[in-house]
Amino acid sequence: MEKKSCYVCGKEALSKNEIGLTKKLLDKNSKRFYCLDCLAEYLEVDTAFLLAKVEEFKEQGCKLF
Amino acid sequence: MIYADNAATTKISDLALEKMLPFLREQYGNASSQYLLGTRAKRAVEQARRQISAAIWAKPPEIIFTSGGSESNNWVLHNVADSYRGQAIHVITSSIEHHSVLNACQALEATGAELTYLPVDNYGRVAVDDVKKAVKANTRLVTLMLANNEIGTIQPISEIGRFLYESGILFHTDAVQAVGHIPVNVNDLHVDFLTASAHKFNGAKGTGILYKKSGLKLLPLIFGGAQEQGLRAGTENVAGIVAAGYALEESIATMGETTERLKTMIDATVNGIRKRVPCVKANGDPKNRLPGTINLRFDGVSGESLMHLLDLKGICISTSSACTSGNDEPSHVLLASGLTEKQAKESIRISYGRHNTLEEANIVAIAVSEAYNKINSVT
């Protein structure tokens, strides 16, 4: 699978969770991806909150994570 | 937190909670018991039956308590199937019913019944003429919802009911979204069966209502004791039933004022969003709809993403195509109303209730607009 980098800071090799969060929260077909820190800053929430959301989505069976 | 998903469920009213609590604590008697603790519970159940029957202009014996709207809907459909077992029957419904009706209809089809799923127009309305045209010699039941849970569209139930009454065909309406929110009079609607659910009108979860017109045959759902006229055996959910009675009575008493407040809140939200996001469109009927429910569409932005971004800000709204297990099927209601799959997935539902405020409605407008802009700027 092609490695994704952060659209804002350039962090390379984004994790599956980071890619999944971008798709889940912004756009399933997004061509731009965010690392956890940059996504948290963009959405004005803290990273711990986003990580908790990842666990929620996994519990729901979302296949993006 | 701002809760703007009252079509999904509502916060229990203070009065309903206060009235139900004694039946979970000191007044915990079984309503079938003959001593004081039991007879008090029985009296409370019968008082709730009177409160609910008065709210929908029915008679107390016409009210049967169930576990919820889905049970009531299923019961009516199974009753028709079982009453005409072995006969070729025809049932009419619409393509935008709640899944507790649609899936029960499909179960009926599997047993050999013929089903007609009526289409709706772009506002989500069933045409009275379509009902008339669909009726056959063996039509035994028509089941149509009074108000839709996703778009809030109110159906012309009274007009359809009048026609069906004259035709001698049983008529059931799923009024789960309507009871406690708009005036409901079973006589004006000309319905034989009506479904309601307490948690949709600030009662407790786990209590449903089935109205059955006097004199009509209804086969038992659960065999056992003599509860609910021997039709639905099992110890009554006394606390939930008591809460339902008070919650509905309270909803009816405050309906006029609540309706005006809800309309003001919906207008504030829609106008506030439209000012910031001119491309927003409203799904459903602009006139004949529930006062507190609005379904909005945002070109190019996923409704699910909007819902999640609002959730991050502590605002609860809903989308009918949320992906929970990799399956994000678009809403059958929006598709039936003429939207494309893409458009259906770009829609959200905001539904206010009596506990919401105008200030919250304005905050929701700003939050939805900001969420839209955040998503739109990366897509």
Image (cartoon, rainbow, N blue to C red):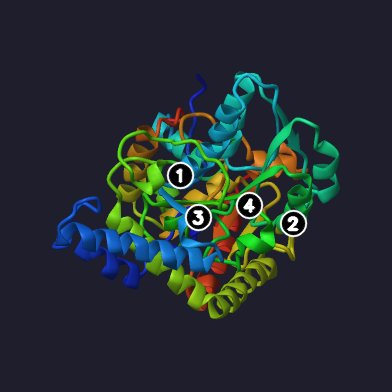
Chain of residue at mark 1 = A
Q: In the rendered view of the protein, which quadrant contains the C terminus of chain B?
A: top right
Q: Which residue is drawn at 54% across and 75% down?
A: B255
Mark 1 residue type: Cys
Q: Which of marks 3 and 1 is in front?
A: 3
Chain of residue at mark 2 = B
Mark 3 residue type: Glu
The reply to the same-chain question for discs 4 and 3 is yes
**Alpha carbon distance from label 1 to label 2:** 57 Å
The reply to the same-chain question for discs 2 and 3 is yes
**Alpha carbon distance from label 2 to label 4:** 12 Å
Give the image location of residue B292, x and y in percent. Answer: 58, 66
Q: Which residue does the numbered mark 1 point to in the structure image? A: A9
User: Which label is found at residue B156?
Assistant: 2
Element marked by disc 2: loop
Mark 4 residue type: Asn
Q: Which of marks 4 and 3 is in front?
A: 3
Q: Which residue does the numbered mark 4 point to in the structure image? A: B148
**Is the residue under label 3 in contact with that under label 4 (CB below 8 Å)?**
no
Sequence-earlier tag: 4 or 3: 3
Q: Residue at x 33, y 38 (%)?
A: A55
Name the residue furthest bottom: B257
Q: Nearer the viewer, mark 1 or mark 4?
A: 4
Sequence-earlier tag: 2 or 3: 3
Q: In this view, does B51 lie to the left or right of B370?
A: left
Front-lying residue, B354 or B28: B28
* Residue B339 shows up from this direction: yes
Mark 2 residue type: Pro
